[in-house]
Image: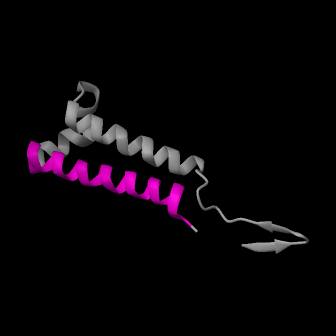
Amino acid sequence: MRIIGHKQEQGARGKMEAIDIILIAAGIYVFAGVSIKFDFFWNRGRILRARNIIGDRNTVIMYVIIGIVLLGVGIWGGFFRA
């Protein structure tokens, strides 16, 4: 908190920025893609390569972890950043 003249300016706590919303949306997209396995998501190049190299199960685990990280960073940035 800074004091400017007679006003106090609050920090970014509790204020969602565009990047936070994008990260949360990307996390939801990744979760939906690996749980529902949409054709446009599950059969695109990057995921197909991962599926061929490490298998379907490990690809799902990897993308769930990526989704958790995206959601975590987006939620942390939107609600808990000081």
Region of the chain picked out in magenta, as a range:
54-81
- Residue 59 picture location, percent across and down: 16, 47
- Quarter of the image for the N terminus: give it: bottom right
> Residue at 67% across / 65% down in the picture?
11
Relative horizontal placement of residue 59, taking residue 17 as reference (left or right): left
- Residue 2 picture location, percent across and down: 77, 74
- Quarter of the image for the C terminus: give it: bottom right
Quarter-of-image position of residue 28? top left
- Residue 63 picture location, percent across and down: 24, 48
- Residue 50's place in the image compared with 2, above or below, is above
Relative horizontal placement of residue 15, taking residue 20 as reference (left or right): right
- Residue 76's place in the image compared with 33, above or below, is below
> Residue at 49% across / 44% down in the picture?
22
Q: Name the main secondary structure of what is drawn in magenta.
A: helix
- Residue 47's place in the image compared with 9, above or below, is above
> Residue at 58% across / 56% down in the picture?
14
- Residue 7 picture location, percent across and down: 85, 67
Residue 21, magenta (yes or no): no
Q: Which residue is situated farthest in the top direction here?
A: 39
Quarter-of-image position of residue 44? top left
Quarter-of-image position of residue 32? top left
